[in-house]
C-alpha cells in the first residue's frame, strides 16, 4: 500500500479553477469544498483531504487545529499531515444538511451535543467559527462529529451557529415546519442568509 504522502502525490489538481484531473484507484472522492477535495481511503476507516495548490497554508492551519482538538470525541483523530494534505478518521453518517434534505430528524439532544462540542473546543483556547450544516455530522450511533475546523483560530466573532439554533428553535421545532427541504430551497436560504435578507430574528448575523 502506498504511503499517505504517495497517495497525496497521485492527486492532480489543475491550477485553473482547481479542477480534479486524476487520483489513485485506492481513493474515493467523497467531498469538494472551498479549499480542498476529500477522499475516503478505500478498505480503511481513514480519509485524506487534499488542498488546492493555492490553499496549502490552510492545510497547515487546519492540521495544527486538529492537533489542538485531539482526544476530544467530537472531532476526528488526525494521523498525518503534509504540505497539502491531512489524514484523519473517515466519519460515517449524515451532515445536518443531508438530514434536512432527506427528512431525517434533528433532535434537541443533537443540538445540545453540538453546543458541548463547541464549548470543549473553546476550552482549548479556540474560537469555533464557520459552523454550518455541512460540517456537522450525525453518525449511525447518533454521535455528533465536527469537521473542517480551519477557521477555529480566527479572532472575529462568528454568529452562524447562534443563527442556526435560532432557526432550529423558532421554526424547525414547529409542527408546521417541513422537516424535509429540497436542495434548491436550502441553497436559496443559504444565499439569502449570506446577503442578510432573512427575517428579522437573523438580522444580528455578522458573517464575513
Image (tube, rainbow, N blue to C red):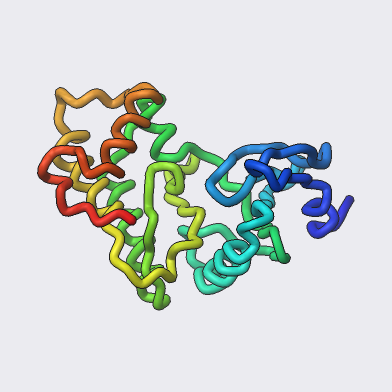
Please name the residue shown 65% across and 62% down the image. 56
Position of residue 199 measured from the top left corner of the image (x, y, whole percent) = 14, 38
Q: Is residue 199 left or right of residue 60?
A: left
Q: Nearer the viewer, residue 106 or 60?
A: 60
Q: Residue furthest front?
A: 16
Q: Nearer the viewer, residue 18 or 87?
A: 18
Question: Which image quadrant for residue 87?
Answer: bottom right
Question: Tag count in the figure?
Answer: 0
Q: Nearer the viewer, residue 98 or 21?
A: 21
| 78, above or below 205, in the image | below
Q: Is residue 126 left or right of residue 84?
A: left
Please name the residue shown 67% across and 49% down the image. 47
Please name the residue shown 15% across and 31% down the image. 174
Please name the residue shown 42% across and 76% down the image. 124
Position of residue 11 measured from the top left corner of the image (x, y, whole percent) = 77, 46
| 118, above or below 96, in the image | below
Q: Is residue 2 left or right of residue 100?
A: right
Amino acid at each position: 500500500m502506498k504511503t499517505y504522502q504517495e497517495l497525496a502525490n497521485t492527486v492532480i489538481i489543475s491550477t485553473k479553477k482547481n479542477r480534479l484531473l486524476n487520483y489513485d484507484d485506492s481513493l474515493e472522492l467523497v467531498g469538494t469544498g472551498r479549499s480542498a477535495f476529500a477522499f475516503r481511503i478505500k478498505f480503511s476507516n481513514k480519509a485524506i483531504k487534499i488542498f488546492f495548490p493555492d490553499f496549502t497554508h490552510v492545510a497547515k492551519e487546519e492540521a495544527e487545529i486538529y492537533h489542538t482538538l485531539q482526544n476530544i470525541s467530537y472531532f476526528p483523530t488526525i494521523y498525518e499531515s503534509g504540505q497539502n494534505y491531512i489524514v484523519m478518521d473517515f466519519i460515517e453518517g449524515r451532515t445536518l444538511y443531508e438530514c434536512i434534505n432527506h427528512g431525517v430528524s434533528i433532535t434537541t439532544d443533537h443540538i445540545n451535543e453540538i453546543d458541548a462540542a463547541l464549548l470543549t473546543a473553546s476550552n482549548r483556547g479556540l474560537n469555533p467559527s464557520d459552523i454550518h450544516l455541512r460540517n456537522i455530522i450525525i453518525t449511525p450511533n447518533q454521535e455528533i462529529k465536527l469537521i473542517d475546523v480551519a477557521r477555529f483560530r480566527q479572532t472575529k466573532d462568528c454568529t452562524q451557529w447562534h443563527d442556526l439554533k435560532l432557526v432550529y428553535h423558532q421554526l424547525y421545532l414547529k409542527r408546521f415546519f417541513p422537516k424535509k427541504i429540497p436542495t434548491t430551497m436550502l441553497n436559496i436560504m443559504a444565499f439569502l442568509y449570506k446577503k442578510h435578507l432573512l427575517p428579522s430574528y437573523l438580522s444580528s448575523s455578522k458573517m464575513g
